[in-house]
Amino acid sequence: MTEKILILDFGSQYTQLIARRIRELQIYAEIVPYNKEIVLDDNIKAIILSGSPFSVKEEKALHIALDTIAGKKPILGICYGAQYMANYFGGKVERSQKREYGKANLADFQQEDPFLRGISPGSQVWMSHGDTIVALPEQFELLAGTASIPVAAFRSKSGAFDQPMYGIQFHPEVTHSLEGLKLLSNFAVDIVGCKGNWTPGSFINQIVGELKEQIGGEKVLMALSGGVDSTVGAALLQKAVGDQLHCFFVDNGLLRKDEYANVLESYKGMGFNITGVDARELFWNALKGVSDPEQKRKIIGKAFIDVFEENAARFKGEGIQWLGQGTIYPDVIESVSVHGPSVTIKSHHNVGGLPEKLKMKIVEPLRMLFKDEVRKVGRAMQLPEHILNRHPFPGPGLAIRILGDITPEKVTMLQEADAIFINNLKKYNLYEKVWQAGTVLLPIRSVGVMGDERTYEQTVALRAVNSMDGMTAEWSRLPYDFLAQVSSEIINNVKGINRVVYDISTKPPSTIEWE
Ligand code: XMP
């Protein structure tokens, strides 16, 4: 079994980052809400207590029975986690006069302690806290301070507990803590003794074994989108159960130019047992005359379910019991939401209700992986780079990039303009420097002049963003000459478009898509 580090989440904005850093050390880390009942089995090698937007001094503070885990596994408390530890065992934590936010330098530290071994004197760390530990409990000792706080790092005294406990006021998981990864490695590898053997290869072996066991001789159905997640998910399933996996890929009439043929071709090349379903008319008819973005999403979601059900029924005749899905870790992390249930800004199209209706069992090979890890697994399986490096593309496709109602003619016009933009990004080696790019067809006409003729035609907006995860985004600073080239190519070649604009809005307050 895989060794793992458990991260108890107290609602910090950085909790996911802690998991990612630990995983960079090739140690599997899993996030669970602070109050989830946990069974400390042998696979769990250590526990990390995350930060939190709360103060240990406030009434709303989140509590755990720390004495029930103390001494059972090594523990590292980060920020709130450290304060909680200090407070819990009888130390003193006070509200600071002013929130300490930003860079600080470790001072007077105990270089011989395994936690700080190899860390440079004055090492830069990142602080973000409102409380300060002013006195440590009796069973603990100081490891380091900074110029502004007395306790930046501490540990339990040797022999005070059966397993060591460490606490740090700063955030080793953010890159501004320059030796943060080294500190996490000192804890996880040197102190805890993790082997660090969780690699894409070991993940593949493990998951393929699990999938074989889970599915046995039964059959699996999976809808593929041409994107990274569903492709890697299907490749793992195929490796596990071979031709017991049946895939299909739907042309909803809202894909990019030639995408249907190209993706189907790639899938066939990968040996998938795949069926292409041309459902363009069904989607276009359902969308006829609809302009409202949320309405479009709902219609597309429903049309997809109809197509899916029809195909599932066909395959079900062959006795398919499983439904494969490309769900990834950020979708399943049960984080502590300090803001309550999140507000839906755009209702993302998914097939959540399907399995109950179809009475199928769900299999999700990627549910424990972050996006970049999915790519690494895909690479280790030698899947085509053009699929692994694809920009994200929304489920409702071009429907939410055609403002106003949708007609097949508008889809073709947008596909042509978009293909020019994307092909040029690839040609000028910009595609991989941009996180997502697309073209939006605007419902306005403006005057232009072409040759001797006055034109009165539509506008497209080019959108290219840099982002980590789509939650926030910065518009890409594409070179002017490149934009000029794309603009003139579109206006000269796509009938009906006489104007091209570039979207220079940041998310927030804008969003990436226009609808
Ligand atoms: P926004 O527009 O919300 O987009 O800034 C963030 C990311 O989500 C994608 N997106 C969607 N994906 N169904 C999807 O599967 C949708 O309805 C949808 N809306 C937006 C968008 O392309 C970007 O990557």
Image (cartoon, rainbow, N blue to C red):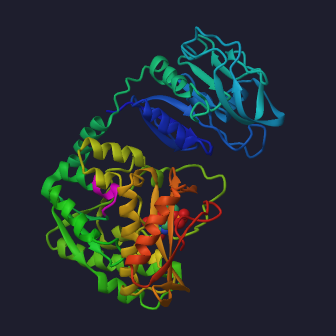
Where does residue 146 sit, x and y in percent of width and height?
74, 21
Relative to residue 244, is residue 86 depicted above or below? above
As for residue 227 lying within the magenta part, the answer is yes
Looking at this view, is 154 or 501 the one in front?
Answer: 501
Which segment did they paint magenta? 226-233
Q: Which quadrant of the figure has residue 34?
A: top right
Please report the residue visible at 23 percent of the width from the left and 52 percent of the height from the top.
Answer: 235
Q: Quadrant of residue 313?
A: bottom left
Q: Quadrant of the N terminus?
A: top left
> x, y percentage for residue 295?
50, 82
Residue nearest the observer in this picture, 69 or 319: 319
Single out the residue that lies furthest toward the right: 97
Residue nearer the viewer, 210 or 351: 351
Numbered circles on residues, count = 0
Q: Position of residue 365 (x, y in %)?
A: 31, 51
The image position of residue 245, as x and y in percent, is 18, 59
Q: What residue is rendered at 68% in x and 17% in y?
A: 144
Q: Is residue 90 above or below residue 344?
A: above
Left or right: 267 as drawn, with respect to 361:
left
Q: Residue 314 lies in what quarter of the image?
A: bottom left
User: Left of 480 or right of it: where is 53?
Assistant: right
The structure residue drawn at horizontal position 63% and vertical position 18%, both measured from the top left corner, is: 155
Q: Is residue 311 left or right of residue 477?
A: left
Position above or below: 357 against 381: below
Magenta stretch, main secondary structure, is helix
- Judged left or right of residue 320, residue 391 is right
Query: Can residue 421 be seen in this snapshot?
Result: yes
Q: Given the current orientation, which residue lies at the most extreme top position?
A: 112
The foreground one among 267 and 359 is: 267
